[in-house]
């Protein structure tokens, strides 16, 4: 019965999203709707759709949730901004320099609702993108495979693996079970950066007018490349885009480095084996990588005041608590008490992981995302693209590092 209800909800969401996706900005203005661009999924996108519908019931103002593919979001909005017809609102993870000067200042809303502004994007004293949620990179394991192999795993912060111990455990699981791979990691530099931070990387930073990094970054990248041996890790996730989540959910992979956004999906959809979230391994320091979505409102939508009112409503403590519960969010509103109905202990583990992380865990979320907005060009996916070339034997690791430094310098170095 629960499966049937869940399927009906998803079908309803698909119908709503499909109907919205054909609307234009001018249609929104004529009808008085607020266009809200969201990269659709069955959890977070559905949560925002439900809350938007509640707002319409309470106020009579229709919020039109438009499903935009994640890979197209920045490009689509950029084109609309340049044509003078931006959407009213968007949930985004990245930015374009073309948006600079076209985003509304949401400082007052954040102050009134106790939103953590340090997790947002502030430029020249204006909060242009408050956080909508907080995510963190983390590790999941197939508990059944570990139990079958007789391999223990961390159950508290007192017995966390080193990376060497973790890989040794995976090798034992591979030897004693029918697991196909030991580990998969999303093909994302956001996930890779977490590993690099665990090896002591300080990320990429400007020094004497050029971007550079510390030697530990190279150590972490070299280690990652060695893991992609098609035994511990399948190279296909990074080289051909094979879906790491689907591979883990097949039950044939021992561990999966992904993040907190998977909790609700795994709880609802993994039925053939038991999974657990565990503390991530480390080399020199514990570290996750913080991420999440931002909420932005655009000047020039002709419904700016209405957009501000909706955002204020959404961040009101009672409403935000419901949004975070529906979407499985780690909250960004101070004092928000989220009643997680699914695996609350896993959310607690992620909170502990964040609290124990080195400060560099927030580097990508804040400094690098700000650069995407205020610089003349973006350097997103620089690390990923260079490493894919290395995995494909198109260049050496040292050549990849030089490519990363050069691209960051050309995009972000001051006075370049």
Image (spheres, rainbow, N blue to C red):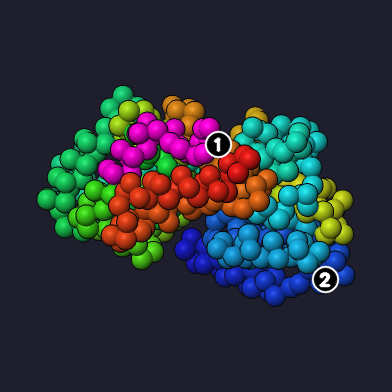
Percent across and percent down for residue 263 are: 45, 48
Specify start and end residues of the magenta stretch as a single range.
Answer: 200-223
Q: Quadrant of the C terminus?
A: top right
The circle drawn on residue 10 is none
Name the residue: 76% across, 63% down.
Answer: 82
Percent across and percent down for residue 278 are: 34, 38
Q: Return the residue at label 2.
A: 26
Q: Return the residue at label 1.
A: 209
Query: Which of the two residues, 271 or 222, is positioned nearer the viewer here?
Result: 222
Q: Is residue 116 visible?
A: yes
The stretch drawn in magenta includes residue 399: no
Q: Is residue 340 visible?
A: no
Instruction: Give the answer, above or below, for where 84 lies relative to 108.
Output: below
Instruction: Determine the secondary structure under disc 1.
Output: loop
Location of residue 40 (image quadrant): bottom right
Name the residue: 43% across, 50% down.
Answer: 403
Question: Which circle's residue, 1 or 2, is located before the other in the chain?
Answer: 2
Percent across and percent down for residue 189 are: 44, 49
Q: Is residue 44 left or right of residue 315?
A: left
Instruction: Give the answer, above or below, for where 161 lies relative to 57.
Output: above
Contact flag, marks 1 and 2 (Cβ < 8 Å): no
């Amino acid at each position: 019965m629960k499966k049937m209800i869940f399927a009906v909800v998803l079908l309803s969401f698909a119908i709503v999203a499909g109907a919205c996706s054909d609307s234009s900005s001018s249609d929104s203005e004529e009808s008085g709707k607020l266009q809200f661009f969201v990269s659709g999924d069955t959890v977070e996108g559905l949560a925002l759709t439900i809350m938007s519908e509640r707002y319409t019931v309470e106020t009579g103002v229709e919020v039109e949730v438009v499903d935009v593919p994640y890979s197209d979001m920045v490009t689509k909005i950029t084109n609309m901004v340049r044509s003078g017809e931006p959407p009213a609102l968007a949930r985004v993870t990245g930015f374009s320099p073309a948006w600079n000067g076209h985003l509304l200042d949401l400082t007052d809303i954040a102050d009134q609702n106790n939103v953590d502004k340090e997790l947002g994007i502030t430029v020249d004293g204006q909060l242009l993108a408050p956080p909508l949620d907080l995510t963190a990179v983390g590790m999941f394991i197939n508990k059944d495979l570990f139990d079958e192999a007789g391999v223990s795993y961390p159950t508290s912060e007192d017995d966390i693996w080193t990376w060497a111990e973790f890989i040794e455990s995976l090798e034992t699981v591979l030897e004693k079970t029918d697991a196909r791979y030991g580990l998969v990691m999303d093909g994302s530099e956001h996930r890779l950066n977490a590993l690099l931070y665990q090896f002591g990387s300080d990320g990429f930073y400007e020094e004497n007018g050029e971007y550079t990094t510390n030697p530990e970054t190279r150590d972490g990248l070299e280690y990652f490349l060695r893991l992609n041996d098609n035994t511990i890790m399948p190279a296909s996730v990074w080289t051909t885009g094979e879906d790491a989540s689907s591979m883990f959910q097949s039950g044939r992979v021992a561990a999966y480095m992904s993040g907190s956004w998977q909790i609700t999906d795994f709880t609802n959809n993994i039925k053939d084996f038991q999974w657990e979230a565990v503390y991530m391994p480390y080399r020199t320091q514990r570290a996750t990588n913080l991420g999440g979505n931002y909420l932005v409102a655009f000047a020039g939508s002709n419904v700016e005041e209405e957009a501000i009112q909706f955002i204020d409503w959404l961040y009101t403590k009672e409403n935000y608590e419901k949004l975070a519960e529906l979407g499985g969010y780690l909250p960004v509103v101070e004092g928000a008490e989220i009643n997680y109905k699914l695996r609350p202990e896993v959310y607690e583990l992620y909170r502990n992981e964040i609290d124990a992380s080195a400060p560099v865990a927030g580097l990508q979320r804040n400094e690098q995302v700000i650069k995407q907005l205020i610089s003349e060009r973006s350097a997103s996916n620089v690390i990923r693209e260079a490493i894919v070339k290395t995995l494909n034997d198109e260049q050496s690791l040292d050549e990849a590092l030089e490519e990363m430094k050069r691209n960051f310098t050309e995009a972000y170095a001051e006075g370049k």
